[in-house]
Image: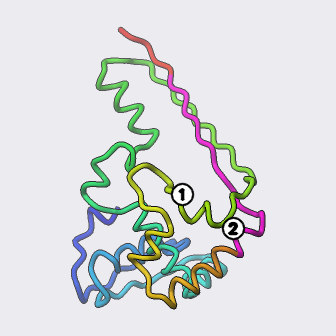
Amino acid sequence: MLDYVRLRPGMTLADIGTGDGLVGFRAIERAGASIRVLMTDISAPLLRHTEDPFSPLLLRCRAAQFPDTEKARSLPITNYGERDLVRFAIDAGFTDIHLELHIEVRTEDSLPWETFLRTSPHPLAPSLEEVFEKESTRDERAYLEVRMRAIFESGAQLGAERIAYLTAKRP
């Protein structure tokens, strides 16, 4: 979405339906600290979430592993969705296309924290440990590790498995 907004330093961006603040924090990353982002949401808990200093630090880690750059957007491994399957089928000349998306969300068994730190979410991403070293100050890293480790070791980690089934007719 931010690709269609002409972000510039000093402007004000209204993020309506802020959720976890991803759009607003990404706008700040792109345009710099002088951009003003007004975050609104009907969910008071979500708005409080954006005020927690943990949120922008966590989003900075996610942004390092899943960069919002032209290169990342051009690579299927980092920018791919179910709509792409439909587009590929259309481009290949198929008709009567049907897509079913199944998402299973459940708790996952936790890896040891040290293994998690050294694991990459996809082949092009740095590990969390590498992100901490390159993107964080010593104090930020200590703070992030305490908060993330507590969440990670709580056993309340959710994982999502996504499977898309596409059927179509070849004319």
* Image height of 95 relative to 118, above or below: above
Residue drawn at 37 percent across, 49 percent down: 79
Mark found first going from the N terminus, 2 or 1 = 1
What kind of element bears circle 1? loop
The image shows residue 48 at horizontal and vertical percentages of 62, 85
Asked if residue 169 lies left or right of residue 88, the reply is: right
The stretch in magenta equals: 150-166
The residue indicated by pointer 1 is: 119
The image shows residue 118 at horizontal and vertical percentages of 53, 62
The residue indicated by pointer 2 is: 152
> Badge 2: few (under 14), some or many (20 or more) residues near its Cα, within 10 Å?
some
The image shows residue 87 at horizontal and vertical percentages of 35, 32
Residue drawn at 78 percent across, 63 percent down: 155
Say if the magenta span includes residue 151: yes
* Image height of 53 relative to 159, above or below: below
Name the outermost residue toward the top: 171
The image shows residue 32 at horizontal and vertical percentages of 28, 84
Three-letter residue code for mark 2: Phe
Q: Toward which corner of the image does residue 1 lie, by quadrant?
A: bottom left
Q: Residue 58 carries which label?
A: none
**Closer to the camera in the image, 135 or 28:** 135
Say if the magenta span includes residue 163: yes
Which of label 2 and label 1 is nearer to you?
A: 1
Three-letter residue code for mark 1: Thr
